[in-house]
């Protein structure tokens, strides 16, 4: 399969939804929405013309209760929604992502994981041996990003896919 660059969704400007390019989802480009609590998220949804249904409310509450990125299945379980409502969970996550409330990240070979971004974007390091993921403020990776840009002319982001390698413990065990 040949990838020609941007999908048609991105051709006319910033994306408002995930697109599939070359078999891989591309992240939403909506800036993160700043918020501190659930009520601010509900108000933002209503301001955009969305109804805050019971499944939506429960998904948002489950995201606030999660202490790390969570799969849609884990969010559905925490929201106490029946397995049949998994499509509703995905629809709500997509809506929240378009609004800038949620981001999804691919950590390893499992499903996409979702997290709130009310306090700002996060980027990740992933250990390929033990699977431990470390969440970082993007500024912590600026020296790496600057070096990639200096050497290759490419401005890297590590919020959709992590930097993969070995954590300190696994690297030490390898020696």
Image (cartoon, rainbow, N blue to C red):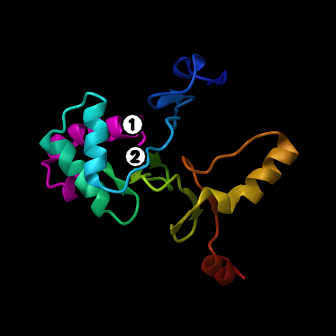
Tell whether position 79 is magenta: yes
Quarter of the image for residue 169 reads bottom right
Cα separation between marks 2 and 1: 8 Å
Question: Does the rendering let one see residue 74?
Answer: no
Magenta stretch, residue numbers: 76-102
- What quarter of the picture does the N terminus occupy? top right
Q: Position of residue 167 (x, y in %)?
A: 62, 73
Q: Residue at x 49, y 50 (%)?
A: 106
Q: Position of residue 90 (x, y in %)?
A: 29, 39
- Which sits in the foreground, 149 or 73? 149
Q: Residue at x 19, y 47 (%)?
A: 57
Tell whether position 49 is magenta: no
Q: Nearer the viewer, mark 2 or mark 1?
A: 1
Q: Tell me if residue 136 comes above or below residue 73 in the rendering.
A: below
> Disc 1 on helix, strand or loop?
helix
- Which sits in the foreground, 111 or 65? 65
Image check: 124 left or right of 17?
A: right
How packed mark 1 is, by other alpha carbons closer than 10 Å (few <14, some 14-19, many 20 or more), is many
Mark drawn on residue 10: none
Q: Tell me if residue 118 comes above or below residue 97 in the rendering.
A: below
Q: Position of residue 32 (x, y in %)?
A: 48, 44
- Which sits in the foreground, 36 or 82? 36
Q: Residue at x 67, y 77 (%)?
A: 171
Question: Does the rendering let one see residue 119?
Answer: yes
Q: Tell me if residue 51 comes above or below residue 9 in the rendering.
A: below
Q: Residue at x 31, y 30 (%)?
A: 48
Image check: 155 left or right of 63?
A: right
Quarter of the image for residue 21 reads top right
Residue wearing tag 1 = 99
**Overall secondary structure of the magenta stretch?**
helix
The reply to whether dot 2 and dot 1 touch (C-beta < 8 Å) is yes
Residue wearing tag 2 = 102
């Amino acid at each position: 399969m040949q990838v020609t660059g941007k999908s048609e969704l991105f051709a006319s400007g910033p994306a408002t939804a995930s697109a599939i390019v070359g078999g891989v989802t591309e992240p939403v480009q909506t800036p993160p929405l700043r918020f501190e609590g659930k009520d601010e998220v509900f108000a933002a949804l209503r301001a955009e013309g969305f109804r805050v249904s019971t499944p939506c409310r429960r998904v948002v509450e489950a995201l606030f209760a999660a202490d790390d990125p969570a799969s849609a299945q884990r969010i559905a379980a925490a929201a106490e929604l029946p397995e049949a409502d998994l499509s509703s969970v995905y629809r709500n996550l997509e809506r929240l992502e378009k609004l800038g409330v949620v981001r999804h990240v691919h950590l390893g070979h499992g499903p996409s994981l979702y997290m709130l971004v009310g306090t700002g974007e996060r980027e990740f390091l992933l250990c390929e041996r033990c699977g431990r993921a470390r969440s970082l403020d993007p500024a912590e990776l600026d020296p790496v990003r600057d070096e990639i840009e200096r050497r290759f002319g490419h401005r890297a982001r590590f919020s959709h896919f992590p930097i993969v390698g070995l954590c300190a413990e696994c690297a030490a065990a390898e020696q």
